[in-house]
Image (cartoon, rainbow, N blue to C red):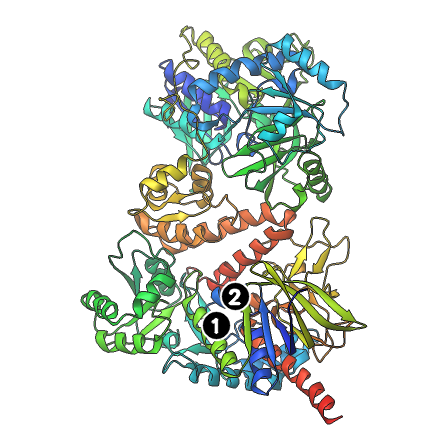
Amino acid sequence: MLTTDVLVIGGGATGAGVAWDAALRGLDVVLVDRSDLATGTSGRFHGLVHSGGRYAVKDPDAAKECAHENAIIRRVAGDAIEDTGGLFVTTPFDDPSYADRFADGCRATGVSCEEIEPGVALKQEPRLNPAISRVFRVPDGSIDVWQLVWALAHGAQDRGVRILPYHEVVAIHREGDEVRGARLRNARTGEHLDVEARLTVSASGAWAGQIAQLAGIEGVHVMPGRGIMIAMSHRLLDTVVNRCQMPTDGDIIVPIHTVCVIGTTDVHTDDPDDHTVLQEEVDAMLEDGERLVPGFKRARALRVWTGVRPLFEDRKEGVASTRDVTRAHALLDHVERDGVTGFLTITGGKLTTYRLMAEETVDAVCRQLGEPRRCTTATERLPGSEDGHYYHVGDRLARREDALLDDQLICECELITRRRLEDAIRRQGTADLDDIRRALRLGMGPCQGGFCIYRATGILHGVDGLDATSANTALLNFLAERWKGVFPILYGDQLRQARFDEWIFQGVLDVEHLPSAG
Amino acid sequence: MSPTLTYDVLVLGAGVAGLTAATCLAQRGARVCVLAKGVGSTHLAPGTIDVLGRDPELVREPADALPGFIAARPEHPYALVGVDAIAPALEWFSDCVEQGPQPGYRYTGGLDRNHLLPTALGALRPSALVPETMAGGDADDGTPVCAVGVRVLKDFHASLCAANLELGGLRARAVDVHLDVGRAEANALGLARRFDEPTFRAAFAARLVPLLRNDERVALPAILGLRDPHGAWAELEKRVGRPVFEVPTLPPSVPGIRVYDLLRAALRAAGGRLVIGAQAGSAEREGDRVTAVRAHTSGHETIYRTRWVVLATGGFDSGAIELGSDWQARETILDLPLRGMPVPGEPRFVADYFAHQPMARVGVAVDSSLLAAGTSNVYVAGAALPGAEPWREGSGEGIALASGHRAAQSVLEHEGAVSAA
């Protein structure tokens, strides 16, 4: 049994943001997630830090919010952000009249925006479609979401927050009209753990309806909007590029670390855990890429994944929509809405506004606790971002050069050294290579783990004396997970790469015939 | 005007299949040239000759299992070349090893019984014909194993290998040898080059001996030299006073490079020519015959005229067969018809990593003499052939050797007919 002020359910950017915010305000916090941190919606998007441009016409309030938060998170979370800048380009496939509306929208919403000559943009991004007619420069950026969420988590941990990944909420403790905590199930051991909390915050995004139901609260309806994203090998572009049109499918390419990501689609689904990738979606996405970057289809597609947007709709009878309906996120005060104390739901929204969502949530927590405390997340820099510098794509190479003679390179694609890998294994306390993948980008590069995953398994086995069966399981799980993201997009040189990887794993190492215990 | 060279046979691809076909032809007096974009799969593979390892259960005796395996798979390369073609191909290879440039180096085994050799993970792989330097790892030998890691080599983890051998029922433990090579890492190839130096062998043995116990055999990553692996291995066994065997590492594969070196030497000894770094471009045709291939080498084009072509360029792995983003597959050099493609609407790949992947058996369509469909002078060998799944079957080198032989034989039969006429 754990006792705390605030139990936060959901370890995405919002939940980790709430934990960090509440910890800074001196509250005692327990943060739980059914899986690793940032494996739901947060870990499954394209990595865009919105300038607000994408909403400038469609949703002015969201645009204002993004513009405001963009400036803040660049300041407090620079270590996770790359200052790529962004372009909105009018291609021959776009309605040319949108460009003027876009410029007006940016002006009206405070989104920094400057029109530049197409020639200037083409000089900066030579692979862009040369037929673009108008170009606007905006302060988009890209963000390593795992870097962000783990920085929030580590900062919170340093202030006493207890973080329990792989702990699923199986029941919400409710007495009368009061929520008093939750029962967790350790996904690895099956053991149960009760948490008694003065306040329980559901920051479970697309899963918020499921958590609300456990608390006996009806009508919290989150319609998951499923979208696919494809990571392409190398940075075909060094700047975020959006099509200058009403936001739609496949109209944005985000350079991030060693890859670039094209997104996304929007298909309604009933199940937030639905990760179906349809062939038509893949084909359409590749065609869309071709419109922005001619030759896109000949580049290597590394991995495809889906994420679900939490699109909130309040279906409680008699609740008039008193909130501003254009707002992308929703904070539900269940005292006001349902007469239930001790429980808050925060859902909807987007990664760029995670901090604002956390601030509003912890404000509401403090109100319910009757302890007004000031939010400081707009000025407090996250661990790793103290120097205020942005991440730069050459940083890892610079570090590698420094340690050239005295450290081994385990993942050549993502420049991960043995020491860094061993540190991460110890710090995360995990035997799951997918957790390490997210923390370090292990195996995320062009070879998709072909070389580094055998090495990492050997090192995992060596660190802390992990038994062979667990090491084998980690390896096989990694390969199975990877294959799910790889098989729908195998063509061209990446098919060749995949065959080479299979050669190593199934041929040289014969992973399929590893011994098993007993 | 591009320079023109004329050969009897042009072999495309320098893997085991291509080098085998070319060498056999050259040994029988044909004027042969091998054109290859780069070195073949030898540098990636463990260097063993796998003929049939799984069906899908473990095969202990390939000679006994092959007839049934072939009967169940009429489109498999083994079914085309015939079961009787396999043993002579293996014997031919063993001869090449014995006459090869690595003094005393030899392979042991054959079709009667598969060796079960540890992988770098400690799984056990079945192989028919194996380098003498690996044979001591056979799991049928009950002697305890001491797996020796070399700290600078990140591509072999002795402790995991030993732990899995234990899990598999062998007695095993692991030790690490610390070598100072002036930096934190060296790959298998770099270490193998060091093992060609007598002083390095002695120094390595001196570090290893104190770590060993009485009754154990010593598993080392496969780094025991390129020029004289037999000498390095025999010397190490003598110095440590125990059996020593090599375990294949991640690529680059040292035993695989030895295979390439010895086949290349055999080709040259027979008068064949090998051009690496040649990107085959367009082909010239007369009716259903390919009469010339234009190839680009270091910035210039050469026209290679020929009477016969052996296509041994591999499958999807080498890029010789390509799947486009439009999901159409094609053979990239001669645009030959393919076989085994899933029909539209069928999945190309399935979500389960270990399940049979429908695309895995795609290859160039051939008749039973390995003649490519739609041609009268192009024979196909090795991984370009359809109908096999080499890693799952443990059959890659067996197919390469047997089909390389068969392709050569098919050419020679026709040449004989032409000469006789």
Element at label 1: helix
How many numbered dots are placed on residues in this image?
2
Q: Residue type at mark 2?
A: Val
User: In this picture, is A341 found above or below A196?
Assistant: above
The residue indicated by pointer 1 is B260
Res B230 quadrant in image: bottom left
Mark 2 chain: B
Residue at image point 63% right, 81% down? B408
Element at label 2: loop
The residue indicated by pointer 2 is B39
Give the mark nearest the N terminus, 1 or 2: 2
Q: A326 or A259, which is in the foreground?
A: A259
Question: How many angstroms separate mark 1 from mark 2 (CA)?
Answer: 8 Å
Q: Position of residue A369 (x, y in %)?
A: 43, 9
Q: Residue type at mark 1?
A: Tyr
Q: Is residue B79 left or right of residue A82?
A: right
User: In this picture, is B344 found above or below B57?
Assistant: above
The C terminus of chain A sits in image quarter: bottom left
Q: Is residue A58 left or right of residue A8?
A: right
Residue at image point 66% right, 29% down? A225
Res B374 quadrant in image: bottom right
Q: Position of residue A346 (x, y in %)?
A: 55, 19
Q: B300 or B265, which is in the foreground?
A: B300
Q: B363 or A188, which is in the foreground?
A: B363
Q: Is residue B232 left or right of residue B308?
A: left
User: In this picture, is A403 found above or below A493?
Assistant: above
Which residue ends up furthest to the right in the rendered image? Answer: B287
Few, some or many residues within 10 Å of mark 1 (<14, 14–19, 20+): many
The N terminus of chain A sits in image quarter: top left
